[in-house]
Image (cartoon, rainbow, N blue to C red):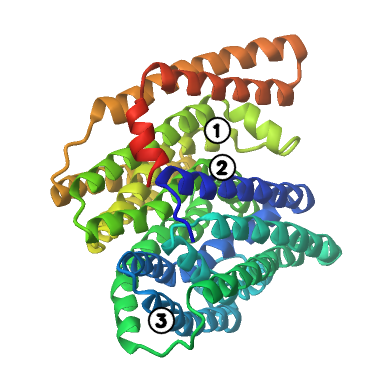
Amino acid sequence: MKKQSLLKASLVLGIAGILARFLGLFFRWPLIMLIGDEGVGYYQMSYPLYMFFVAMASGVPVAISKMISERRVKGDIQGVFEIVKESTILMMFLGIGTTLILFIFAKPIIKFVQWDMKSYYALLGISFAPFVISIMTIYRGFFQGLQNMTPSGMSQILEQIGRVIIGVGLAILLLPKGIEYAAGGAAFGAAAGGTIGATYLYEKYKKVKKQMWNKKIKSNPEILTSILKIALPISIGTTVGTIMSLIDSILVPQKLLQAGLTSEGATILYAQLTGKANVITNIPLTLSMALGTSLIPIIAENYVMNRKRDLESKVQLSLKLSMLIAMPCTLGLFFLAGPIMKLIFPGKYDGIEIMRYMSLAVPFIIITQTTTSIMQGIGHYIRPIINLFIGCIVKVILTFILVSMPNINIYGAVIASISAYFIATILNIISLKRRLHLKLDIFQGFIKPIVASLVMITGVVAAYLFLFNKTSSNGSSCLAAIFLGIIIYIALILLLKVFSIDEIKSKIIKN
């Protein structure tokens, strides 16, 4: 199977991820229209807890990706499929265990974190997903290790299609029983979509296995040990990252009550933060996650083959791509917060200011994700965990203090998130420079993307205001302004020579 270059692999996953995110908006949009912010709040309370349990197993696909990339470059094809076999056994136990914990202990969990008991049905609905998702991640890790991101990208799209159709369908069917039942039906969509995505990946895997190694695979306990050595620190790191969302789900509703809001009011504000603002700001993060996923096996291959020049060039390129993604998205979400919210949630666009300020966290999250992937690729797993854990401590302290203040309330959670990721970003960059003795190209990798983004957003805002004054149509004005912004931004990247012709040939087109 032919390998894909860093940019091509990132684009494949990025485009698939964005399509999946937009399909996710088609999931959230009817949900908000059907059950409102309160119902979405019940759904969102269960979701971070599910993501926390999934994060516990997330190190396995990263370990698979890294180990397969290293074995393939050495010509050890048998070892590639031994990795898949041992990881399947491990993920079966983790997936079944996670599903049983969420299903059996749903009510005690809700009582412990002091959620509204109406979130029970959402937690039950989502409890079936971890088993399905954990199996699917094995095959995603396999194809990512082969540096072919197309199957992973297609599985994301199929997963979201299934989630939208089945999740929204169940929400409509169960709505007459109450919004809490509808939220539970919507939550079950995650398991349904995961089943479709996993089936597609398994069929693709069988075809590739037949081509590469059509023999019986023996058990190899040593490989399982190697998987665990790599996966455990990554899982801990991902779990620490997921704790950011879990902190919001536990602390924010409680502290909003202390700020003087009613239970319903607290649930609504929480839904606006996590069900609207975070969903929209997460769209650009899809590109950075695709970059990180593509980066790990490529960095690992260059590192294990001791290609120092190639390794440094890939690191510089990945940081530059991160800034090229982060800056225009941040400025676009900040200055067009109102038009974008009104476009996506017509008539239900409360939470504009929450999204506006939440967008300021985007560049710090993206740089944190990218630098973490680089350090994982070179085998340094613990340091990014410690850095993110320090960020989590800051988030807990600020959330605890600020959200309970009546004049700050939900914006305290936004300030806490921005501060946490800012600290994690700074610490990760310091760690990366120490590990690789890397001198960052600040002008090329940071200053030029910022300048291009500032000029772009000036044109975008001017275009939106002009078109809106002429047409009075928010939707067409917003879409036209965004499209114009893309054209301006691409032109500025070329004009400012953010990428040289030689760099495009040597670092982007080639692996």
Q: CA distance from mark 2 to mark 3?
A: 43 Å
- Mark 3 or mark 1: which comes first in sequence? 3
Residue 168, quarter of picture = bottom right
The secondary element bearing badge 3 is classed as helix
**Few, some or many C-alpha atoms within 10 Å of disc 2 (few <14, some 14-19, many ≥20)?**
many
The image's mark for residue 210 is none
Q: CA distance from mark 3 to mark 1?
A: 51 Å
290 displayed left or right of 391:
right
Q: Position of residue 400 (x, y in %)?
A: 38, 53
Q: Relative to residue 57, is residue 424 depicted above or below?
A: above
Q: Position of residue 264 (x, y in %)?
A: 65, 53
The image's mark for residue 353 is 1
- Mark 1 or mark 2: which comes first in sequence? 2
- The reply to whether discs 3 and 1 touch (Cβ–Cβ < 8 Å) is no
Q: CA distance from mark 1 to mark 2?
A: 9 Å
Q: Position of residue 104 (x, y in %)?
A: 59, 84
- The reply to whether discs 2 and 3 touch (Cβ–Cβ < 8 Å) is no
Pick the residue in front: 495 or 177: 495
Q: Which residue matches tag 2? A: 277
Residue type beneath disc 1: Glu
Total numbered labels placed on residues in the image: 3
In this rendering, the label closer to the viewer, 1 or 2? 2
Q: Which residue matches tag 3? A: 82
204 displayed left or right of 457:
right
